[in-house]
């Protein structure tokens, strides 16, 4: 799995954890090990520009995903998943810090960025949360991936509750 993390935000973030949880999520979703992903961490101004340009919505957001090859998790019958370019995930630590502090289960900016990374991966794989049934499926899968990664890493305490907008 080729995953690049590029921090352009000026904020110190746990890039290794972002890389690790992205790799874990992609493996869990059975994405081809030669697929490629890019994660970019930006400041609030850059995120706001992207949010306006691509979503026509004001203000910065927490995470945006830009799929490339529209890869999907393989079905159980598929012998080999296809490989390709997954796309880009853009994260904003300023928004993540606020969401983590405001969440029902308070958590750190880095924990929120880990959750947002998984959220972004799932969006790249075609998951969405516009409809209630889609939201239940996506957020359930997101929680299972974050919980599995945290357990594998020996991290204790509650996982961050979904605060993704």
Image (spheres, rainbow, N blue to C red):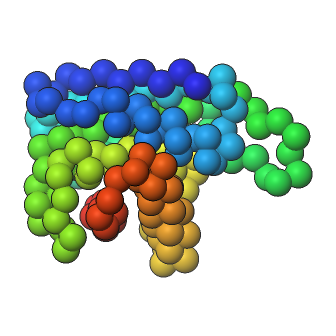
Say left or right for 4 vs 106: right
Q: Is 113 above or below relative to 136? A: above
Give the quarter of the image for residue 94: top left
Q: Is 86 above or below relative to 25? A: above
Q: Is 23 above or below relative to 10? A: below
Residue 87 shows in the view: yes
- Residue at the spot 44% in from the left edge and 60% down from the top edge: 147
Residue 129 shows in the view: no
Foreground: 42 or 56? 42
Say left or right for 105 vs 129: left
Q: Which quadrant does the C terminus fall into?
A: bottom left
Say left or right for 142 vs 155: right
- Residue at the spot 26% in from the left edge and 52% down from the top edge: 112
Foreground: 160 or 50? 160
Q: Residue 16: x percent and y percent? A: 34, 29
Q: How many marks?
A: 0
The extreme bottom residue here reads 132
Q: Residue 28: x percent and y percent? A: 61, 48
Say left or right for 154 vs 58: right
Q: Which quadrant does the N terminus fall into?
A: top right
Give the quarter of the image for residue 90: top left
Foreground: 134 or 48? 134
Q: Residue 129: x percent and y percent? A: 46, 65
Q: Is 44 above or below relative to 61? A: above
- Residue at the spot 48% in from the left edge and 49% down from the top edge: 152
- Residue at the spot 35% in from the left edge and 53% down from the top edge: 155
């Amino acid at each position: 799995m080729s995953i690049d993390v590029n921090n352009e935000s000026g904020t110190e973030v746990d890039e290794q954890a972002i890389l690790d949880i992205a790799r874990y999520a992609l493996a869990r979703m059975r994405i081809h090990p030669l697929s490629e992903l890019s994660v970019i961490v930006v400041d609030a101004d850059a995120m706001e520009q992207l949010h306006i340009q691509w979503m026509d919505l004001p203000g910065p957001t927490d995470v945006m995903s830009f799929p490339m090859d529209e890869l999907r998790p393989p079905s159980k019958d598929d012998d080999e998943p296809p490989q390709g370019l997954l796309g880009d995930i853009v994260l904003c630590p300023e928004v993540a810090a606020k969401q983590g502090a405001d969440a029902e289960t308070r958590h750190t900016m880095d924990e929120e960025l880990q959750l947002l990374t998984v959220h972004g991966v799932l969006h790249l794989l075609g998951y969405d949360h516009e409809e209630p049934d889609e939201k239940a499926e996506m957020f359930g899968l997101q929680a299972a991936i974050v919980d599995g990664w945290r357990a594998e890493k020996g991290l204790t305490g509650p996982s961050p509750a979904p605060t993704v907008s």
